[in-house]
Image: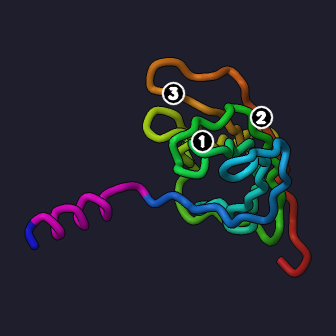
Amino acid sequence: MRTVKGLLGCLLALPLLVSAEEIGEVSTVFKWVGPNDKIVVEAFDDPKVEGVTCYLSRAKTGGVKGGLGLAEDRAEASIACRQVGAIRFSGKLEDGEEVFKERTSLVFKTMQVVRFFDEKRNTLVYLVYSDRIIEGSPQNAVTAIPILPWAGQ
């Protein structure tokens, strides 16, 4: 019981990040055994910026290893964030703040989305990239949302 309480305490201490909702997927490579390689499209809302939704597409490795969660997914990803309502901040925004993170290999590799606020241009900028404990990847994608008035605001 003591171990369970300690584990729960650790989990509550972790920063709250958003989980993505899968919008759809397409198969890219047929595999005889296990799931096919595919591209998945996911959506998530920025936890600190109401009125912003980001859409992320990324490769997901199939086969036996992919089906068991042991494969390492490719570093390529694409992102498009859009204003979907009145934009309101629910806290102080930190440049480079992580808004989404997902494991893309069993242990060492993750894909992250970070946010920047370009105050001069009144624009939110989102960057997606992949990193690895030893060596990250320079492949990345960026999207920007000018903060505009929303109807009925």
Tell which tag, 2 or 3, sits nearer the viewer: 3
Residue 3, which numbered label?
none
| Residue 132 percent across, percent down from the top left | 51, 27
Graded by Cα atoms within 10 Å as few (under 14), some (14 to 19) or many (20 or more), the crowding at tag 3 reads: some
Residue density around tag 1, few if under 14, some if 14–19, many if 20 or more, within 10 Å: some
**Tag of residue 112:** 1
Mark 1 vs mark 3: give the one in front.
3
Residue 90 x %, y %: 57, 65
Residue at the location (65% across, 60% down)? 46
Answer whether labels 2 and 1 touch (C-beta < 8 Å).
Answer: no
N-terminal of the pair, mark 1 or mark 3, is: 1
Give coordinates of residue 53: x percent, y percent: 75, 62
Q: Is residue 115 left or right of residue 52?
A: left
> Measured from the top left, where is residue 88 in percent x and y?
68, 66
| Residue at 68% over, 42% down | 61
- Magenta residues, as a range? 3-15
The residue that disc 2 covers is 141
Give the residue type at disc 3: Arg
Labelled disc at residue 132: 3
Q: How many marks?
A: 3
Which residue occupies the foreground of this view, 48 or 152? 48
| Amino acid type of the residue that numbered disc 2 sits on in the rendered structure | Ala
Mark 2 or mark 3, earlier in chain = 3
